Every structure is written in structure tokens, then in C-alpha cells.
Image (cartoon, grey):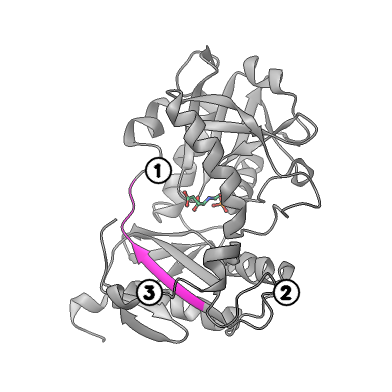
Amino acid sequence: MQPTDKIWFNGKFIAWDDARIHVLSHVIHYGSSVFEGVRCYETSAGPAIFRLADHTRRLVESAKIYRMSLPFSAEEINDATVELVRVNGLRSCYIRPVAIRGYGEIGVNPMKNPVDLYIACWEWGKYLGEEAINHGVDVCVSSWTRPAPNTHPTLAKAGGNYLNSQLVKMEALTDGYAEGIVLDHNGVVSEGSGENIFVVRDGKVYTTPMTSSILHGITRDSVMRIARDFGYEIVETALPREFLYIADEIFFTGTAAEVTPVRSIDRIPVGSGDRGPITARIQKEFFELVHGDKPDRFGWLSPVGVPASAGLVR
Ligand code: PPE
């Protein structure tokens, strides 16, 4: 990770190296954080943040689920995010807002601890590799299961949820795969360790529903809207594991993963074993939209303005 100049902390910009917390902060012991992952893309009109308001909304909602009162409004968080990217003079980056239960008391009850909000950003390339975007990744079905309903709420993007994701990811990597697909407590497909999943069969585009223990991804929503625009039928339904083995095409979506094709599952080739045509079409449209190569017809981009490094604003 390449450090940048500033991190936003509770309304102020602080130096990257000063963004430290005490070892007895509540979050360290009990996983009590909610966070977001947002991307800012380079466009011909300068950097632009992709679906910022939707990410901030999900952050606020994740906090709400955990009875965490954020010390800043959605509007203030949006403004701070834009300002952070500008102050760091980045043309493109990954942005990580994170709200933590901080230092004060120890014990499960988090309600006496302060809630601290940080926003950091840094340059982050392709999540599953450059080659992955063009030719796809080899993945497995994980031996782990996603949290059951009414255990760890998966619609909250909470730090603690990622213990499950880490088990999935480590197992997949150890066994020679790029990623793992996790089943839910009913044994049907949920999602990847950090991505939603789409399956194409007979020209229809399938994705797993909110009731399959997924995070309701913002990239997932973007891809559904793009695919609908193209006239594809979108089917949001529970998918049996073996549906993956007879798919024509499969791809992952996520802020970090963007739109990444899957070329094999458990060493069984998906379709031709390379990126499929519908995946390629959706992926191309996605990248053109995020980079502003096409008019922003969905209103997804928040322009950052002139980078501070250009010397015009500080
Ligand atoms: N499911 C999970 C479990 C998940 O973590 C993500 C994002 C998604 C689906 C896709 O959601 P969205 O980004 O809104 O399209 N995972 C983030 C964290 C990745 C990481 O390694 O950290 C991300 O992609 O930013």
C-alpha cells in the first residue's frame, strides 16, 4: 500500500502516519467497525468518485444496524471524501471510510465508547490481477458457509463480517485458487469473499438475492442497471451450486474487483474457459461509464475538481 499525504479523521486532515489507535480500542477486541470501499476514477474531466452518495448511504445504514451514531452526516461525509481525494492530489484511488468504536471502556457493551470516523485513500490497482480482468480467475466453492440470517447481518458492511471472508480467501489461496465462492446456510450460492456473483445462461443474467446472505453490492446494482439497459433479463434468485458448473459465463462484481470474469469453478471450465461475450459487453460499458468515456447517464460520478497538487487550491 502506497501511503498518501493525509487521512481525514473526525473532521480534520491528519498525516498518514498519525492515524493510529490505542490497542484497547473497542474495535480491536470485538470487531466493532463499519466501513466502505469506494473508487475514484480518472476521467478526462479530472478524478471522479463512483457512486459516492450510495456508498455513504450504506455506511450510514451499516452504522444504524449496529446502533452506532456517526458523528457526521451523510452530506459531511460526502464532502470530506471529495476533499480528501483533492487534498491528496490523486488522479485515481480506492477510498476507505471506516467508523470504529474507539477507546474508553473494555467489555462487550460498545455504547460507552466514542465512535471515530476515518477516511483514507490510496492508489489500488486491479484486485484480482490485470490478467483477471481480461481472461478471468480460477475459483473454488469454499468449504466455509456465509453467516446465517440473524447471526452477523450481511447487509451491514461491518469489520467483523470479514473474519468469515478471511477464512474463505485463505482457504482458496492455499488451495491454488484466486477466490472462493461461499454458499449460504441453505447450501445455495451466496457470493465471493469480497464480491457479488453473476451467472449467465442462455442469454439471461442471474444473480443471488439479498436473502442469500450477501452484501447488497453497489457494483452489483450498477451491473444490473447496465444489463437491463442492454435488454438482458435479470433473474435475482437462489442459485444451486451446480448451476455454476453448467453456466455459460460467470463474473464477480465489487468496488475492488470491479467486473472480473470467472473462468473455472473447482477446475471445471466455465463456458469456453475464458471471458464470455455478455461479460465482456457489460464490463466494457462499466469501464466506459466509470472513466467518463460515455455520458454519465445514471448520475454515478462525483467530480473531485482540480487536484491540490496542481497548486490552485489548498
Ligand atoms: N460482497 C462482499 C462480501 C464485499 O466485501 C463486497 C465489497 C461486495 C460484495 C461488493 O460490494 P460493492 O463494493 O458495493 O460492489 N468488498 C470490498 C472490500 C474488498 C477488500 O478486500 O477490502 C470492496 O470491493 O471494496
Q: Is residue 136 above or below residue 28?
A: above
Q: Quadrant of the N terminus?
A: bottom left
Residue at image position (58%, 62%) is 31
Viewer can see residue 219: no
Separation of marks 3 and 1 at Cα, in angstroms: 25 Å
- First in residue order: circle 3 vs circle 2: 3
Of circles 2 and 1, the one toward us is 2
- First in residue order: circle 3 vs circle 1: 3
Of circles 3 and 1, the one toward us is 3
Magenta-colored span: 117-125
Residue in front for this viewpoint, 279 or 32: 32
x and y percentages locating residue 220 in the rendered image: 61, 46
Residue at image position (77%, 44%) is 148
Secondary structure under badge 2?
loop
Tag of residue 20: 3
The three-letter amino acid code for the residue at tag 3 is: Arg
- Is disc 1's CB within 8 Å of ligand 1? yes
Residue designated by label 1:
127
Secondary structure under badge 1?
loop
* CB within 8 Å, label 3 to label 1: no
Residue in front for this viewpoint, 193 or 225: 193
The three-letter amino acid code for the residue at tag 1 is: Tyr
Q: Chief secondary structure of the magenta span?
A: strand
Residue at image position (52%, 65%) is 28
